[in-house]
Image: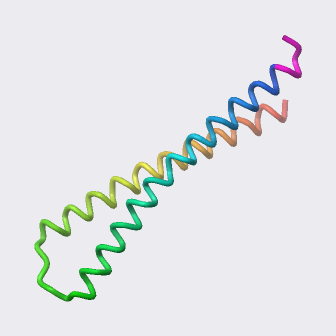
Amino acid sequence: MPKEEVKTQLKDDGDARLRAVLSGIEPELRRLNAVISNLTVLAVAQDNIEPTALTVLAEVGSDAIGRASSSWRDAFDLVHAAQRRSAT
């Protein structure tokens, strides 16, 4: 396979992986949006809130942030690797 075809294939593979990683962030952002929406409802209602309910919301939000952050780092690494390849 000619060198140009190899570079094109690497770029296409990298682009596909980057899109997959970034697409994986969307569900986590939706979870975070749901957590914030629930916290807003609880704040407006001003009822006594069971600590267990807040614990669950905190865990869901924390897990979503962790996964989104991990995906973001993966995406950054893919872009950095692509830049190094294109510099050579």
Query: Residue 56 location, x and y as percent?
Result: 21, 61
> In the image, what residue occupies the spot 64% across and 38% down?
78
Viewer-proximal residue, 15 or 65? 15
> In the image, what residue occupies the spot 43% across and 60% down?
30
Magenta span includes 4: yes
> In the image, what residue occupies the spot 12% across and 71% down?
51
State left or right for residue 51 relative to residue 1: left
The quarter of the rendered structure image containing the N terminus is top right
Magenta span includes 39: no
Q: Quadrant of residue 57?
A: bottom left
Q: Identify the colour scheme used.
A: rainbow
Q: Is residue 13 above or below residue 67?
A: above
State left or right for residue 16 relative to residue 63: right
Q: Which residue is outermost to the top?
A: 1
Q: Quadrant of residue 81?
A: top right
**Which residues make up the magenta segment?**
1-5
The quarter of the rendered structure image containing the C terminus is top right
Query: Residue 71 location, x and y as percent?
Result: 51, 46
> How many callouts does the rendering have?
0
Query: Residue 72 location, x and y as percent?
Result: 54, 49
State left or right for residue 76 relative to residue 49: right
Viewer-proximal residue, 70 or 32? 32
Would you say the magenta stretch is mainly helix, strand or loop? helix
> In the image, what residue occupies the spot 63% across and 41% down?
18
Q: Quadrant of residue 59?
A: bottom left
Q: Is residue 48 above or below residue 7?
A: below
State left or right for residue 12 relative to residue 18: right
Viewer-proximal residue, 84 or 72? 72
